Image: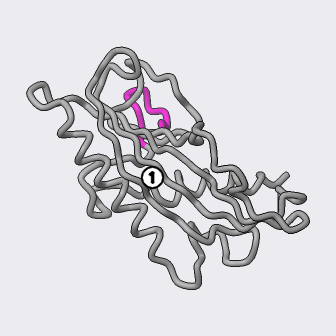
C-alpha cells in the first residue's frame, strides 16, 4: 500500500534533504545513517520522535508536526482539492560546548537551513522530488530558528528548532494518491 501524501512529504524531508547533510556534501555536520559500534545500521534523523536518551547519537534531528494552531480558514478547499499548509518543526540536538553551549546549535541549524534552501531551488516546482502535479509541494518557507541551552526539562543537551511550512496541493478525498 502506498504511503499517505503527507507521510511521503515527511519522508522526503528526512531522506532527500536532512540525511544529505554530510561533510562530503559541504556541510559541517553529518546527519546521514551510520553503522553503530555493534555493526548495526543506525539513524540520526527521525520522524515523530520526541523522547531521546543517552544511547542516541549526537548530533541528531527529529521532524515533528507543529502543534500550534493554524489560522482559521487557512486551507483553500474546492471539493476534495485543497491548498494547505503543512507545518513542521525540525528539532536538532547537539553536543554541548561547555563554555558556550549554544554555539554548536547555531552551526547545526545553519546546516539544516542551508539544506532546506537548496531543496527549495528546484526547476519545475518539483519540490522534494515529489513531482509537480497534485498532490505535490508547491511552496516551502523556512521560519526563524530558535536555539536553547540544555535545561533538563526538554533536553539535557543544547538544541534548536527550525519551523518549516510546506504548501501542499492535495486532494483530501484521495490522501494515498
Q: Write down the region rendered in magenta.
A: 34-43
Horizontally, is 167 left or right of 30 in the view?
Answer: right
Residue at the extreme bottom? 124
Instruction: Examine the rendered structure and indicate whether residue 138 appears above or below residue 163.
Output: below
Instruction: Examine the rendered structure and indicate whether residue 130 appears above or below residue 109.
Output: below
Q: Nearer the viewer, residue 89 or 47?
A: 89
Instruction: Examine the rendered structure and indicate whether residue 115 appears above or below residue 145.
Output: below
Q: Nearer the viewer, residue 119 or 160?
A: 160
Residue tagged by mark 1?
19
Check if residue 160 falls in the magenta segment.
no
Dominant SS of magenta comes to loop
Residue drawn at x 41%, y 47% as measured from the top left = 162
Q: Position of residue 2 (x, y in %)?
A: 81, 55
Horizontally, is 75 left or right of 145 in the view?
Answer: right
Check if residue 35 falls in the magenta segment.
yes
Q: Position of residue 42 (x, y in %)?
A: 48, 36
Q: Could you classify mark 1 by the number of other residues whose Cα lies within 10 Å: few (under 14), some (14-19), or many (20 or more)?
A: many
Amino acid at each position: 500500500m502506498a504511503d499517505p501524501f503527507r507521510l511521503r512529504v515527511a519522508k522526503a524531508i528526512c531522506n532527500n534533504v536532512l540525511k544529505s547533510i554530510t561533510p562530503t556534501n559541504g556541510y559541517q555536520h553529518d546527519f546521514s545513517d551510520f553503522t553503530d559500534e555493534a555493526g548495526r545500521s543506525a539513524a540520526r534523523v527521525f520522524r515523530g520522535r520526541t523522547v531521546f536518551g543517552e544511547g542516541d547519537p549526537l548530533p541528531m534531528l527529529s521532524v515533528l508536526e507543529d502543534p500550534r494552531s493554524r489560522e482559521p480558514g487557512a486551507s483553500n478547499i474546492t471539493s476534495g482539492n485543497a491548498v494547505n499548509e503543512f507545518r513542521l518543526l525540525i528539532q536538532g540536538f547537539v553536543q554541548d560546548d561547555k563554555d558556550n553551549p549554544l554555539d554548536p546549535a547555531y552551526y547545526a541549524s545553519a546546516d539544516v537551513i542551508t539544506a532546506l534552501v537548496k531543496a527549495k531551488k528546484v526547476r519545475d516546482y518539483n519540490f522534494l522530488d515529489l513531482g509537480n502535479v497534485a498532490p505535490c509541494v508547491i511552496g516551502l518557507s523556512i521560519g526563524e530558528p530558535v536555539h536553547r541551552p540544555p535545561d533538563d526539562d526538554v533536553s539535557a543537551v543544547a538544541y534548536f528548532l527550525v519551523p518549516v511550512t510546506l504548501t501542499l496541493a492535495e486532494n483530501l478525498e484521495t490522501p494515498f494518491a
